[in-house]
Image: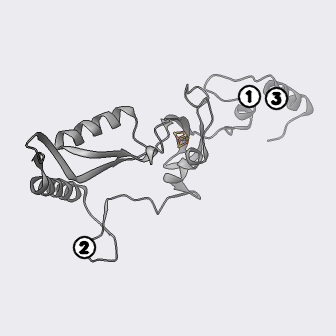
Amino acid sequence: MELSRREFLKLSGAVAGGLMLPGGLSAVALASGYPLHKAVGETPTICCYCAVGCGAIVAAEGDQVVNLEGDPDHPINRGSLCSKGLAMAQLHTVDGEINPRRLQKPMYRRPGASEWEEVEWDWAIEQIAQRVKETRDANFIETDGEGRTVNRLEAIASLGGAALDNEECSLLVKAMRSLGLVYIEHQARI
Ligand code: SF4
């Protein structure tokens, strides 16, 4: 597209003045027939790495994450992210590709095996439930040495992770206490 000097100055002025036309296209974009911006969708999200819960804005084009930055409107982090939060985009996209190292299913290493294998969620959850029940049934302590009721289970311990927030920790502790666990810890205290 050829522009006369007068047309060029008119378009430059429109851009410098921040003139935006309905539909989000600038004067230059309309004049040239090409949009200046890609149709990138931005979505607010919460960092998954720790219970600080920083806010981030993730921009995606199709199924690719093309940008991720701290959310300046989020009351906790006000636009900042630590190094882990900044790397959050890599959970999904690395060098323009879906991250091939991202786990899609639970991994299980059978007793005596040296390799991990993918298993189905239903199988993994059933295994966990079965083993918790077997361990609890075999080790539950109803009374201590002096006959006092204690109803506790010392054969299982629970270790919470940094990604658990207050509400999740509250639910986890209630679930573990209902089983009788006394050894309940959190990664952040270790
Ligand atoms: S890992 Fe970093 S960015 Fe993510 S919530 Fe925690 S402090 Fe915020």
Q: Is residue 63 visible?
A: yes
Q: Label 3 vs label 1: CA separation? A: 7 Å
Helix, strand, or loop for circle 1? helix
Image location (x, y in percent) of residue 4: 89, 34
Examine the image and state in which quarter residue 184 appears.
top left
Circles 2 and 3, Cβ within 8 Å, touching? The answer is no
Residue 69's mark? none
Q: Badge 2 is on which residue?
A: 111
x%, y% of residue 133? 13, 53
User: What residue appears at the point 63 percent right and 22 percent down from the top-left corner?
Assistant: 22
Q: Amino acid at mark 3?
A: Leu
In this rendering, is residue 21 above or below 163?
above
Kindly check if marks 3 and 1 are in contact, taking CB atoms under 8 A apart as contact: yes
Number of residues whose C-alpha sits closer than 10 Å to that of mark 1, classed few (under 14), some (14–19) or many (20 or more): many
Asked which quadrant contains residue 132, the reply is bottom left
Mark 3 neighbour density, 10 Å: few (under 14) some (14–19) many (20 or more): some
Amino acid residing under circle 2:
Pro
Residue 46 as seen in the image, left or right of residue 129: right
Q: Which residue is denoted by mark 3 in the rendering?
A: 11
